[in-house]
């Protein structure tokens, strides 16, 4: 089955982590992608910070363009990756080893992809 | 006497209530097996469970009138299979699947030859952490125990539409999100087993929460929970915690007759111990002994050990409170939940006195204020300290907060004294 895993962080909590620690944890994310190479599909991306986001939203007459992410949430999506694994348990097992989960405010959402 | 003889004997002399109990017993024996087998055949828990649920509704209607047929499992399997095929024909999204299943004889062999009991993998799937706790419970009650949505709604104090929605969502999620129906191996296994055991334990305690109901409830969820605890313990004989939960529920069940008399609740200390069921207590002790030999302690075994201490006494006066307190202290290493800490204060009061216990009760104020038993326990400590007015105020607060008739009458009697 294919799943999108969405990596989210809480920018205001990230600020509390020392740059050395952050760098050390981020370095391990490269290893993580390497270790799990077999389940990674080619779809995935790391995103620029949420401060660069632009949202086009429903407006009465015409769509409205605004600065910022679509939701007011404190969490922001930092990237996503499509993985191909046998079932949800396999997806959870891999996601649990995502190095950034050591940091407070970090979550990973797992969503199955619709197959037509 | 087998179930069929029991059915014949019981249908002749009892009214609806007893025969509903019998139906519950027959149905839960079959339900989980058939759901598991049909899921394997159809490749869809959603469809399988729906078809079995419909078959159960039909069975209840028919069997209530004309008695249980000689082979209730065969009857239910056949009805569920027909329901599934009807649905497959009716609903467009299933058409493709139907082609794959065209040969009905294949279904018969598939389901008929399944000797393996696949209820446990199904149960472990229903209790996946990706399913919300409410839905884990509702789905387990329906798929494994064969309760109808209406029965679950009554037993868990939730509106029927809410329960129905919970079940549908959970089943669809299992299919759409690829939640495997199996017992996990490795490090996940113990954590998942604990969820399963928690669901069974919640099932048992829900039986006592029926609002406006009396202590003896109509569909006996406690009975279902004890039955399910047995299924799990027997199929996983090496899992000490599964034995621990079975032992705990046996001790609780043994005291049921003394706990609720004529719809009135009676506190442990005041219970007539001759009403305890000695056979169940002996079984509880044997199961706990077996668990201990596995040398893998855990919270359910400790809960059971505490219950065992109470069951050892001839009257409330000779309880070994120091041992109870020691067990609670050990339990805190596994489970620091406010409820466990609250229960511990009762033992603490017996060992270190009511003042020490009151301090601990007060430390739980933030977590438990508004929970009727917190107020009732606080009242008890205050009364032991001679602070009668404050005790009365707490009892009144507890009274206001309790939704259960029997519990309310118990508190009213205390306030009246």
Image (cartoon, rainbow, N blue to C red):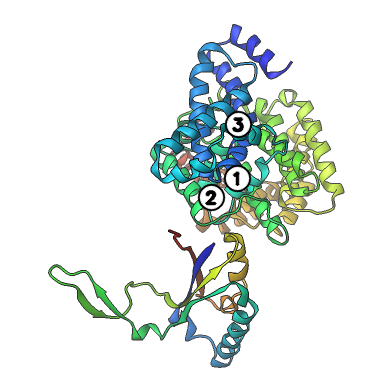
- In whole angstroms, how far apart are the C-alphas of marks 3 and 1? 37 Å
Specify the farthest residue to the right. B293
Tell me, yes or no, if residue B415 can be seen here.
Answer: no
- Counting from the top left corner in percent of width and height, residue B335 is at 66, 56
- In whole angstroms, how far apart are the C-alphas of marks 3 and 2? 39 Å
Question: Badge 3: how crowded within 10 Å, few (<14), some, or many (20+)?
Answer: few
The residue labelled by disc 3 is B105
Q: Are marks 1 and 2 on the same chain?
A: yes
- In whole angstroms, how far apart are the C-alphas of marks 1 and 2? 8 Å
Marks 3 and 2, the one that precedes in the sequence = 3
Q: Which part of the image, by quadrant, shows the C terminus of chain B?
A: top right
Question: Badge 2: how crowded within 10 Å, few (<14), some, or many (20+)?
Answer: some
Q: Which mark is residue B63?
A: none
Q: Are marks 3 and 1 in contact (CB under 8 Å)?
A: no
Specify the farthest residue to the top. B12
Q: Are marks 3 and 2 on the same chain?
A: yes
Marks 3 and 1, the one that precedes in the sequence = 3
The residue labelled by disc 1 is B199
Residue at image location 74% in from the left, 48% down from the top: B241
Specify the farthest residue to the left. A61
Q: Are marks 1 and 2 in contact (CB under 8 Å)?
A: yes
The residue labelled by disc 2 is B133
Residue B309 left/right relative to B373: right
Marks 1 and 2, the one that precedes in the sequence = 2
Q: Secondary structure at mark 1?
A: helix
Protein chain holding label 3: B
Protein chain holding label 2: B
Q: Which image quadrant is residue B289 in?
A: top right
* Residue B251 vs residue B12, the one in the foreground: B12
Q: Are marks 3 and 1 on the same chain?
A: yes
Vertical comparison of A71 with B254: above or below: below
- Counting from the top left corner in percent of width and height, residue B258 is at 67, 26
């Amino acid at each position: 089955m294919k799943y999108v895993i969405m990596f989210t962080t809480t920018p205001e909590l990230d600020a509390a982590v020392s740059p050395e620690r952050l760098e050390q944890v981020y370095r391990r994310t490269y290893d993580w992608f390497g270790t799990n190479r077999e389940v990674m599909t080619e779809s995935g991306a790391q995103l620029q910070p949420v401060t660069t986001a632009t949202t086009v939203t429903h407006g009465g007459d015409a769509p409205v363009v605004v600065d910022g992410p679509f939701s007011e949430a404190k969490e922001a999506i930092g990237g996503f990756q499509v993985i191909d694994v046998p079932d949800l348990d396999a997806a959870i097992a891999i996601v649990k080893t995502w190095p950034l989960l050591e940091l407070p405010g970090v979550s990973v959402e797992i969503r199955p992809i619709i197959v037509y | 006497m087998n179930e069929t003889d029991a059915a014949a004997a019981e249908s002749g002399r009892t009214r609806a209530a007893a025969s509903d109990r019998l139906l519950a017993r027959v149905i839960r024996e079959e339900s989980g097996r058939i759901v598991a087998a049909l899921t394997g055949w159809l490749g869809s828990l959603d469809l399988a469970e729906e078809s079995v649920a419909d078959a159960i509704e039909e069975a209840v209607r028919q069997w209530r009138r004309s008695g249980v047929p000689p082979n209730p499992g065969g009857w239910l399997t056949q009805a569920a299979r027909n329901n599934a095929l009807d649905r497959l024909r009716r609903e467009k999204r299933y058409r493709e699947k139907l082609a794959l299943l065209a040969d009905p004889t294949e279904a018969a062999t598939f389901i008929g030859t399944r000797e393996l009991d696949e209820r446990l993998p199904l149960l472990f799937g229903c209790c996946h952490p990706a399913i919300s706790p409410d839905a884990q419970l509702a789905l387990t009650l329906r798929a494994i125990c064969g309760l109808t949505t209406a029965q679950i709604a009554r037993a868990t104090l939730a509106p029927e539409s809410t329960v129905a929605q919970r079940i549908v969502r959970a089943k669809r999620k299992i299919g759409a999100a690829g939640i495997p129906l199996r017992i996990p191996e490795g490090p996940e296994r113990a954590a998942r087993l604990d969820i399963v055991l928690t669901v069974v334990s919640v099932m048992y305690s829900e039986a006592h929460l029926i609002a406006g109901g009396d202590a003896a409830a109509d569909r006996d969820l406690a009975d279902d929970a004890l039955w399910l605890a047995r299924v799990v313990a027997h199929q996983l004989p090496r899992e000490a915690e599964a034995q621990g939960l079975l032992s705990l529920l046996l001790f609780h069940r043994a005291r049921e007759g003394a706990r609720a008399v004529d719809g009135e609740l009676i506190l442990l200390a005041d219970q007539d111990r001759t009403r305890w069921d000695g056979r169940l207590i002996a079984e509880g002790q044997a199961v706990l002994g077996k668990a201990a030999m596995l040398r893998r302690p855990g919270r359910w075994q400790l809960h059971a050990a505490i219950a065992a201490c109470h069951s050892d006494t001839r009257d409330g006066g000779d309880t070994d409170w120091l041992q109870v307190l020691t067990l609670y202290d050990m339990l805190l290493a596994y489970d620091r939940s406010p409820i466990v800490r609250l229960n511990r204060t009762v033992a603490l009061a017996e060992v270190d006195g009511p003042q020490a216990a009151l301090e601990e009760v007060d430390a739980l104020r933030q977590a438990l204020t508004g929970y009727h038993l917190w107020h009732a326990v606080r009242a008890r400590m205050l009364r032991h300290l001679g602070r009668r007015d404050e005790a009365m105020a707490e009892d009144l607060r507890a009274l206001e907060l309790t939704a259960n008739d029997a519990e309310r009458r118990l508190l009213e009697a205390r306030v009246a004294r």
